[in-house]
Image: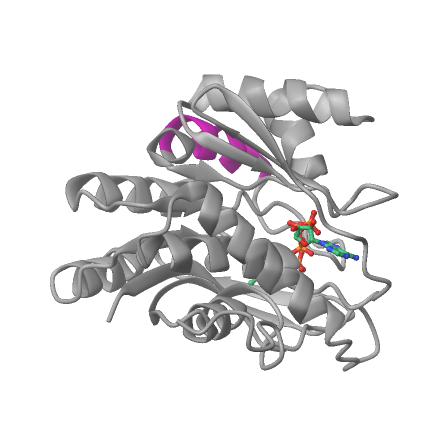
Amino acid sequence: MRTALSIAGSDSCGGAGIQADIKTMTMNGVYAMTAVTALTAQNTLGVRAIQEATPEFLRQQLDAVFEDIFPDAVKIGMVASSDLIRVIADRLHCCKAMNIVVDPVMVSTSNAALIKTDAVSTLTEELLPLATLITPNIPEAQVLSGMEIHSSADMEKAAEQLGKSYGCAVLLKGGHCVNDANDLLYSNGTLRWFEGKRIDNPNTHGTGCTLSSAIAANLAKGYTLEKSVERAKDYISGALAAMLDLGKGSGPMNHAFALNNKYSD
Ligand SMILES: Nc1ncnc2c1ncn2[C@@H]1O[C@H](COP(=O)(O)OP(=O)(O)OP(=O)(O)O)[C@@H](O)[C@H]1O
Ligand SMILES: Cc1ncc(COP(=O)(O)O)c(N)n1
């Protein structure tokens, strides 16, 4: 069985973070492992508290996984501080990790900061250059590129700039656009749009985590990057279209019906 590792924060309400990643990887037929960067006390309304792992404890989790069950892909989500980012970069480099998908998580849907301001430069200098793919949303791409993004043409410019700066593929997500939810992939010097009809569902807690771990799971199974993005886009669209409605705020998605028998493997 193929395996994937999620390095991310725990979300107590189960919609985002490690919990979303385990559900997604499992539903995509991959064995999920975890290295927890932080515990969060959060629900669909907001983040109440964050308790980070110590850098040494995160290192122990990563070594325990890599020395025993080598992951076929790695997904990285919330990492709040520079010291934790450095531990991850060091272990991924030393362990020769492959198929690394970095979701540069900055702010939650409920508007809480999930990375310290001074850690953004550590993320860009130490972690993004190790990535196979980064998956910023529009606000994250604006921070990383220093560009304002108001149109499809701006998205194309920003994705290309980020890909050239970090030497990786870039999936610039269009979930924050007003019309359709079209995502843009920049890879090996070419741009490709993945079109998605906007689903009228306000429950989008964990969409970014889910998309990036679905891509990692499909890379782990040996699909190309383009095919992995296509399959992950189907997964997120299915999970949103299942219209789960839990909690008082922006709720989680329904993973059980995400694939709806679309794929048999
Ligand atoms: N209402 C929607 N209908 C269809 N697809 C959507 C919708 N909202 C988001 N998506 C898709 O979900 C994925 C995540 O995109 P988004 O831009 O919301 O990322 P994000 O902001 O990092 O997610 P989050 O912070 O909510 O975890 C993308 O593939 C995007 O196109
Ligand atoms: C632990 C953790 N990781 C990531 C997110 C981002 O997800 P969202 O933007 O949907 O709130 C989150 N809320 N919590």
Q: Position of residue 93 (x, y in %)?
A: 22, 38
Find residue 216 and report its image quarter: bottom left
Q: Position of residue 258 (x, y in %)?
A: 61, 73
Q: Is residue 39 visible?
A: no
For the C terminus, the image quarter is: bottom left
Find residue 116 and report its image quarter: top right
| Residue appearing at x 65%, y 18% in the figure | 157
The magenta segment: 117-126
Q: Which residue in the rendered view is the most extreme toward the left?
A: 67
Q: Is residue 228 visible?
A: yes
Q: Position of residue 244 (x, y in %)?
A: 75, 79
Label tally: 0
Quick one: 165 or 263, which is closer to the camera?
A: 263
Where does ligand 2 appear, by image quarter?
Answer: bottom right
Assign the magenta stretch its main secondary structure. Answer: helix
Q: Position of residue 165 (x, y in %)?
A: 47, 18
In the depicted structure, whether residue 192 falls above or below residue 45? above
Q: Is residue 231 left or right of residue 220?
A: right
How is the structure coloured here?
one colour
